[in-house]
Amino acid sequence: MAKKRWKKKERLERAAQPVSKGGGSNSKLVLAGVIVLILAGYFIFGSGGDNSLETPPPADIAGKYMLFSDKASTHVQGRVELIEFFDFTCSHCYAFHKDTWPALKNKYGDKVELIDTGIPLRESSIPPLEAYEIAKDFGKGEEMKDALFTAFHEEDLDITKVQILADIAEKIGLERAAFSDALSSRSKASLVESNRRLANSYKLTGTPTFVLDGNIKATGTSSDNLQAIIDSILEGE
């Protein structure tokens, strides 16, 4: 009789023991599987609105380039958007401004839209870039851009100095005091920094760098390469 009571007690104690380690592992595996399914559903269905980021270029592109699949194409039929990342102290940027862009403009007319985006190669490049952005607000952007390139590359002027920048602004017809106030207040500092972040998102390593239709970065900066890319985009529509 005592033996039966002992076995009954043993059965009750065994039933009260926690689940074995093997059972715990199985529970953890099931839970992990549920989490994986939830995450998979999020990335498959929840990110559906970002499909535009995978938009391919409108045609098979000729020339040397890098395609950014994580950036949306900005292509509009009949027109190519050409972003130029430049610095006023860059001699190749000056050559593009003086020779290459006028030739492209002459060939394509309104079919190519230039969006010139100044980025500083060094901290001393910031003042002239801010001066350019200020001049654009006053309707003198093109005049200031040409004057700054000329001042640095032809006249050997120090365009990092506020006094010289104010002289250039006055020379192209801007009111000196208003321009100097805007420059001294660093009113365009955040814009120049934003341009730099945009350039970094394209893995920029130097200037000039050209991005066409938002997601095609030319890896060759020659006029021939740019024309090959532009032609294939326009012809492939």
Image (spheres, grey):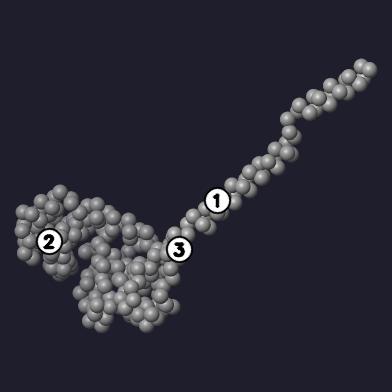
The residue pinned by badge 2 equals 138
**In which quadrant of the rendered view does residue 11 lie?**
top right
The residue pinned by badge 3 equals 51
What residue is shown at x 40% (from left), y 63% (from top)?
A: 71
78 or 149, nearer to the observer: 78
As measured in the structure, the alpha-carbon distance from the residue carrying label 2 to the one carrying label 1 is: 51 Å
**In which quadrant of the rendered view does residue 175 lie?**
bottom left
Q: Is residue 143 above or below residue 190?
A: below
Q: Residues within 10 Å of mark 3 (few under 14, many from 20)?
A: few
* Numbered mark located on residue 39 in the image: 1
The answer to whether the residues at label 2 and label 1 have Cβ atoms under 8 Å apart is: no
How far across and down, in percent of the image, does residue 65 sit?
A: 40, 72
Q: Earlier in the sequence, mark 2 or mark 1?
A: 1
Is residue 56 rendered to the left or right of residue 31? left
Q: Earlier in the sequence, mark 1 or mark 3?
A: 1
120 or 78, nearer to the observer: 78
What residue is shown at x 26% (from left), y 83% (from top)?
A: 107
